Amino acid sequence: MDLKKCEKMAREFLQKFDLKNWDFFFDRAKVRLGACHFAKNKISISREFVILNSEKICRDLILHEIAHALCGAKIGHGKNFKKKLREIGGENFSKKEVRMPARKFTAFCENCGENFQTQKRCKIACRKCCRKFSNGKFCEKFIFKFLEN
């Protein structure tokens, strides 16, 4: 989706749902899609996420963050949140529908080939191999290796 069109849509929704003292901005997140910043009265959405996804997905994400703003900081994603999201015309979307920004690294287990994408390098061992060969205990031998994408 076009960034300018997305920003316009977000600002219109903020007005429509009487969140006039709230603001919108794009962030550089790679792992999460959006955020509701209660202390600053702002919602943000990942710039890369918007570029990669359709208008419908971006619309639903904006409404998702607006539902958070309307519900308050302590509501989370429970029944009341989902009710509010439906009330304002938003839909939950599945992760399968969403295109995510590429992550910085691919972590892989040299033993079994298990792999995943991540933003940071960390010292983590392959759960499958630790369970199978080390009685479920952490083992240095099965620490993931990292390749830069």
Image: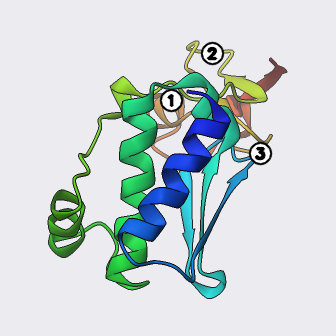
Left or right of 65, for residue 85: left
Foreground residue, 142 or 34? 34
Q: Mark 1 = which residue?
A: 133
Q: Which of marks 2 and 3 is nearer the N terminus?
A: 2
Which structural element holds mark 3? Answer: loop
Residue plotted at (71% across, 34% down): 143
Q: Mark 3 = which residue?
A: 122
Q: Where is residue 148 in the image (x, y as percent from the top left)?
A: 85, 21
| Quarter of the rendering containing residue 18 | bottom left
Q: Do the residues labelled 1 and 2 touch (CB within 8 Å)?
A: yes
Q: Which amino acid does label 3 sit on?
A: Cys
Looking at the figure, which quarter contains the C terminus?
top right
Foreground residue, 4 or 136? 4
Which structural element holds mark 1? Answer: helix
Q: What residue type is labelled 2?
A: Asn
In this view, the mark in front (2 or 3): 3
Residue plotted at (29% across, 38% down): 93
Looking at the figure, which quarter contains the N terminus?
top right
Which structural element holds mark 2? Answer: loop
Q: Mark 2 = which residue?
A: 111
Residue plotted at (37% across, 57% down): 64
